[in-house]
Structure formats: C-alpha cells, structure tokens
Amino acid sequence: QLYSKQLRYFVIEVEVTPGKAGDTRDLATVDIKYRNMQTETVDKLTSSLQLRSTDKVETVKADTYGEALAYCMLQLTTARNREATALADAGQVDAARRLLELNASDLLKCKLECKSLDEKAVQALDFGISANSAQAQSVLNRKEWNLNRKSMRQSQNVVEQQQGYSGEGKIKR
C-alpha cells in the first residue's frame, strides 16, 4: 500500500552479457497500475530501462544515478547487517564487527561519490552510517549488544520496508 508523498522502490539484479562500447539495448519495462484516490480512477505509469555499454570509467561515473545507487547500497548493507546480527548471536563478534564497519565505510563512500542526492537519500545514508558504526562498537560488549540488538533489528526493518527517517538519525514513526 502506498500513500501520497511516500517513496517506494524495488531493486532487481540482472546479469547481462557484455556489449560493445556504444551499444544500447532495452533491458526492462515496468508497468504499474494504481487507484488514484484524488480522481478515483485507475492510473497507469510505464517506464523503460535501457543499458548503454561503454569502456570509459568517467562515463560510468558521470551517468550513474546517485539516488538509485544510494538506495541499492542501503538494501545491500542491510542484508549484511542481518548477517552481522546472526554472526554476533553465534558468538562470532569479530566477524560481525568487520561486516558492520564495512557497511559504514561503503555507505560513506556511496554518500561521497553520489553527486545529486535528495535530502531523504542523504538522511538514509547518514542514518545507516551512524547506525552501523555504533553497532560495530556495541557488538564487542555483550551486555551492550543485548541492549542494542532490538534497535538493530528495527533499523533493518526500516530500510527493508522503506519506512523513512527523521532528520535526527532516528526512525520516523
């Protein structure tokens, strides 16, 4: 269910055969039908995705859609965060700490490399950076870990369910 002014996205991973520099090909078309509550009609949105091959790193960097990359990185680091939780629960705290530190590092790198991010994407990345950094420290102290584990799971759900963030690095309810 989606309400006005909410953001929803989905991430798909595809493997494509390499193309020649300059080649363009259709990759996907997405059609969405929804009930417009203001007009009480069924509306439809359609979008297509094309793939363009290049052999220039500069072209890839210039053409990368930063907001999409940021939200993909959030989903990837959330999956690793879940893995870190399982590792910590199994007593493998060093492995869990390394994953959480990698998450914070990858999210910071993404934030610095992405050129045009909206405020929500920046807040989401900042939230992920601070949460993973704090969790990497708390996992080393068993008592602190037990206290923070619930908020860690809550943070994972926020990202996976695309709930949103407040400007203070806290989960918006």
Image (tube, helix red, strand yellow):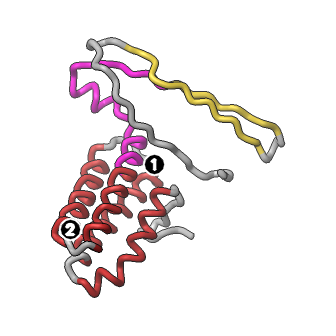
Residue 10 magenta: no
Residue 85 located left or right of residue 141: right
Q: Residue at x 51, y 60 (%)?
A: 164
Image position, residue 42 (x, y; %) = 78, 36
Residue 50 magenta: yes
Vertical side of 44 occupied by 122: above or below: below
Q: Quadrant of residue 57?
A: top left
Vertical side of 24 occupied by 13: above or below: below
Image position, residue 2 (x, y; %) = 65, 51
For the C terminus, the image quarter is bottom right
Image position, residue 75 (x, y; %) = 39, 51
| Viewer-side residue, 145 vs 91 | 91
Whether residue 106 is visible here, answered yes or no, is yes
Work out how far the residue at label 2 is from the one at label 1, CA to CA, in angstroms: 30 Å
Q: Secondary structure at mark 1?
A: loop
Which residues make up the magenta segment?
49-73
Q: Name the amino acid type tagged 2.
A: Arg
What residue is disc 2 on? Answer: 97
Q: Name the amino acid type tagged 1.
A: Asp
Q: Which mark is residue 118?
A: 1
Q: Residue at x 45, y 70 (%)?
A: 154
Q: Residues within 10 Å of mark 1 (few under 14, many from 20)?
A: few
Return the residue found at the far front: 90
Q: Residue at x 79, y 47 (%)?
A: 37
Return the residue found at the far left: 94
| Viewer-side residue, 119 vs 14 | 14
